[in-house]
């Protein structure tokens, strides 16, 4: 466990830079909000708002792939549309290459459209059926008034070859292509002007597995070849793990965890991340018996019109305590390269160890948390706390006893959770 | 759990001709479903045989256009409906609990549909009528097959909604489909499908449109209900993760035919068909480190109007040149029993298959 040393280092100096952070920041998003008003009555007064994106901060660095995952309705697609300025943000700021693009009007955005492109989910809906492939892929050149070397047609044919289509497809129409081929056309169009940032919203979810793999590999190759930066929004956690350098997990308009891909998948810290990952079916029938690893969340995501107070996940979290209901956890870097917004993170020292456990409601929301999960989580938390206490002792004497006291506190919590979990 | 899958009830021998009633609960023999179109004859299903026992789950996997859904609609007898129903060319036999369905009269099939066999669709929003209350739709499904009053049927509907885990069923029974979330709608549809305690449940991509967390809930629900009612389940999906989670047996379809089938452990541990390898290789896995590239199946799925000659998979198969001569291009491979005890339709010699799988494919997965 080389993590141990890193972890202690993080406790001392959380601002320490890791290798990926040395890269230049391409896109910086701060406190981004997008609310959709709900209007009622003759006067169309605003009665409420759907808080699709409600205050998120992140950075995208040059050459990396940031994956964004979450359940439907968590605001990940809205986030994608707002950072590409297809929709106007309600609040917060977006900086692209240091330039504030939050309030730019469409004329001001136009030169930037060259650098920020989008790939859409639906390969059927995102291509105009009345235009030929040639005219679709050459549209960016026309709109931006760019005359590529050797002429537009030649460039378009080169792009078609780049994405694995034949140059002869120039005069064909979208309906003549299969889903995978259409997605390639969408990619060719997005790459036409050599963008710096490509935002892909569910680029492969409409495709068959075998075709999905072709497109994933293609995007991978293009990134190496052209030095692209991707923001890939997807609900499939396996795909996101495969393509991403860093992953942001969203829940109800907030980022709950933002971490390096390997760290996130190997030791998730937010309970929601953990639940989400445990729900992914693993293609290995031998692991079917190991149901105790599964955390089954009951019910649906609460409404983004009136999200729960405090931590938004507390209504479905098996670790929820009083503080979760009252205080919203901030997204803090607990380990280098792993930011989490949680009072009681997994695989780490409890941030509010002595808090009263929230009874009934939250516990009922989780149908099944395997005993193994709880035991393991209690163990890792205790271990992490002990380590942290040891590391912090010389630095801050006052904090050490608090952390070590947290250990016995953890046990009753785990036990009460055990009673709720009904073995099936 | 494991001994259930070992007995492998769905993996009977491929049956060719005899037409006496079989022992299995559901038996499909040499099923062909062809659709004449202006462009030619679309051979969606072209000679498919399998059988399934009560209490077992068979998963049918394959790409879009491989004939999975057409198979399920054929079992339900849904192709005969609609204005174009008369054009469909169906042959072969489908036996459900001793009754033959392909040549049965539409009225007989209608009596079975919903009662003895029922279906869950991928998209509950389009499978339910937007204009009628959820409860009324379930009541209708129940009253078609049971001579009971509306009041009794409504009680039954509430009971079913409760059983599939919809909170406040007595209140939600009067809700409309659009008032339900995706997962809840899928539950309501399962309630509707199960209201008559069918012995055969066909689920066509039941979780494809759902989030993983909801998917896990629905799969658990299907599994529990199967245990409770002892029904046979045919689960159609393209997600091998779901297959590994829930199936006893697996049938892999390609170009309207079965290319491999057997118990789930076998298919995942010693798959014998290059297409199955392709499916396993194209899948990003959440439980593995990401370093390697995916190994996609090259090319596109075949057109069902011009299915490639010989082995339908040969244009996409990286190993098509290994068998001597042009047997892969001219002769259609039949299902053969392979070492390990499942069925595979491939011209590759068994020794080569084992070598390629153990040396080339398995280490990369």
Image (cartoon, grey):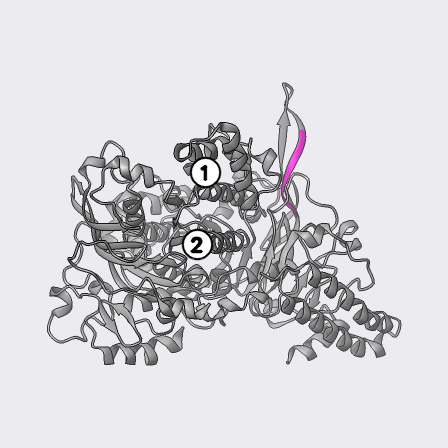
Residue B330 sits above or below residue B215 on the image: below
Q: Could you say whether the residue bearing mark 2 is in a helix, strand or loop?
A: loop
The quarter of the picture where the N terminus of chain A appears is bottom right
* Chain part drawn in magenta: A47-54
Q: Which residue is mark 1?
A: B125
Quadrant of the drawing holding the C terminus of chain A? bottom right
- Report the front residue among A414 and A5: A414
| Quadrant assignment, res A317 | bottom right
Q: Position of residue B186 (x, y in %)?
A: 48, 44
User: Residue at horizontal 73%, vertical 52%?
Assistant: A360
Location of residue B350 in the rendering, given as x and y in whole percent from the top left corner: 23, 77
Mark sitting earlier along the chain (2/1): 1
| Residue A382 shows up from this direction | yes
Magenta stretch prevailing secondary structure: strand
**Front-lying residue, A66 or A149:** A66
Quadrant in the rendering for residue B3:
bottom left
Q: CA distance from mark 2 to mark 1?
A: 28 Å
Lateral position of residue B52 relative to residue B84, left or right: right
Q: Is residue A323 magenta?
A: no
Left or right: B122 as drawn, with respect to B320: right
Do dots 2 and 1 share one subunit? yes
Q: What residue is rendered at 11% in x and 70% in y?
A: B326
Q: Which residue shows up at 47% across the image and 35% down it?
A: B138
Left or right: where A379 falls relative to B169: right
Report the residue that reaches farthest toward the right: A398
Which callout, 2 or 1, points to the residue nearer the camera? 2
Inspect this view and state whether residue A27 appears. no
Q: Few, some or many C-alpha atoms within 10 Å of disc 1 (few <14, some 14-19, many ≥20)?
A: some
Mark 1: which secondary structure? helix
Q: Look at mark 2 in the image and give the residue it sits on.
A: B230
């Amino acid at each position: 466990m080389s993590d141990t040393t890193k972890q202690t280092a993080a406790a001392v100096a959380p601002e320490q830079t890791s290798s990926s952070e040395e890269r230049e920041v391409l896109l910086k998003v701060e406190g981004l909000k997008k609310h959709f008003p709900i209007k009622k009555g003759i006067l169309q007064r605003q009665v409420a708002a759907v808080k699709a994106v409600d205050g998120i901060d992140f950075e995208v660095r040059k050459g990396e792939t940031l994956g964004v995952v979450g359940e439907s309705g968590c605001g990940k697609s809205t986030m994608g549309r707002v950072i590409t300025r297809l929709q106007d943000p309600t609040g917060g700021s977006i900086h692209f290459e240091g330039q504030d693009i939050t309030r730019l009007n469409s004329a001001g955005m136009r030169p930037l459209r060259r650098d920020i492109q989008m790939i859409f989910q639906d390969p059927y809906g995102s291509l105009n059926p009345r235009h030929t492939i040639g005219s679709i892929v050459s549209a960016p050149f026309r709109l931006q008034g760019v005359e590529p070397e050797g002429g537009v047609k030649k460039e378009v044919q080169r792009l078609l070859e780049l994405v694995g289509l034949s140059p002869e497809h120039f005069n064909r129409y979208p309906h003549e292509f299969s889903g995978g081929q259409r997605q390639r056309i969408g990619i060719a169009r997005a790459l036409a002007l050599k963008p710096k940032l490509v935002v892909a919203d569910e680029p492969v979810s409409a495709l068959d597995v075998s075709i999905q793999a072709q497109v994933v590999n293609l995007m991978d190759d293009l990134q190496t070849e052209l030095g692209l930066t991707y923001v890939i929004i997807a609900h499939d956690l396996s795909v996101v793990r495969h393509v991403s350098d860093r992953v942001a997990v969203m829940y109800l308009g907030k980022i709950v965890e933002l971490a390096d891909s390997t760290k996130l998948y190997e030791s998730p810290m937010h309970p929601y991340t953990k639940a989400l990952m445990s729900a992914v079916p693993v293609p290995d029938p031998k692991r079917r018996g190991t149901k105790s690893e599964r955390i089954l969340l009951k019910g649906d995501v609460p409404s983004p019109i009136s999200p729960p107070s405090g931590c938004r996940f507390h209504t479905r979290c098996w670790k929820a305590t009083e503080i979760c209901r009252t205080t919203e956890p901030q997204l803090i870097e607990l380990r280098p390269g792993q930011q989490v917004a949680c009072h009681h993170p997994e695989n780490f020292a409890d941030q509010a160890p002595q808090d009263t456990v929230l009874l009934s409601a939250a516990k009922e929301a989780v149908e099944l948390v395997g005993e193994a999960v709880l035991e393991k989580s209690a163990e890792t938390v205790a271990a992490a706390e002990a380590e942290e206490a040891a590391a912090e002792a010389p630095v801050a004497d006052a904090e050490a006893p608090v952390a070590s006291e947290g250990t016995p506190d953890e046990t009753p919590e785990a036990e009460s959770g055990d009673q709720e979990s009904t073995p099936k | 759990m494991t001994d259930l899958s070992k007995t492998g009830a769905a993996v009977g021998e491929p049956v060719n001709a005899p037409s006496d009633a079989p022992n299995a609960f559901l038996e499909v023999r040499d099923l062909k479903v062809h659709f004449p179109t202006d462009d030619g004859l679309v051979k969606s299903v072209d000679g498919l045989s399998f059988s399934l026992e009560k209490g077992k789950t068979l998963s049918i996997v394959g790409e879009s256009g491989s004939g999975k859904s057409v198979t399920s609609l054929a079992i339900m007898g849904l192709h005969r409906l609609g204005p174009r129903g008369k054009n469909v060319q169906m042959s072969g036999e489908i036996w459900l609990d001793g009754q033959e369905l392909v040549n049965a009269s539409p009225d007989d099939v209608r009596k079975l549909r919903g009662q003895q066999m029922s279906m869950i669709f991928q998209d509950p929003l389009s499978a339910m009528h937007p204009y009628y209350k959820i409860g009324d739709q379930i009541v209708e499904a129940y009253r078609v097959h049971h001579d009971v009053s509306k009041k009794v049927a409504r009680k039954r509907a509430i009971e079913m909604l409760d059983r599939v885990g919809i909170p406040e069923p007595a209140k939600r029974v009067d809700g409309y489909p659009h008032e339900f979330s995706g997962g809840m709608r899928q539950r309501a549809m399962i309630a509707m499908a199960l209201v008559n305690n069918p012995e055969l449940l066909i689920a066509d991509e039941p979780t494809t449109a759902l989030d993983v967390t909801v998917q896990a809930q629905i799969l658990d629900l299907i599994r529990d209900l199967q245990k409770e009612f002892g029904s046979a389940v045919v689960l159609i999906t393209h997600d091998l993760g779901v297959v590994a989670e829930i199936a006893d047996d697996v049938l892999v379809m390609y170009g309207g035919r079965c290319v491999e089938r057997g118990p789930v452990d076998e298919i995942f541990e010693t798959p014998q068909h290059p297409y199955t390898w392709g499916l396993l290789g194209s899948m990003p896995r959440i439980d593995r480190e990401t370093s390697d590239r995916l190994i996609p199946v090259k090319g596109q799925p075949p057109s069902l109007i011009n299915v490639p000659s010989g082995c339908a998979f040969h244009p996409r198969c990286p190993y098509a040149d290994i068998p001597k001569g042009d047997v892969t291009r001219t002769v259609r491979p039949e299902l053969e029993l392979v070492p390990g005890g499942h069925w595979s339709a491939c011209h590759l010699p068994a020794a080569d298959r084992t070598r390629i799988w153990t040396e080339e494919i398995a280490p990369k997965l």
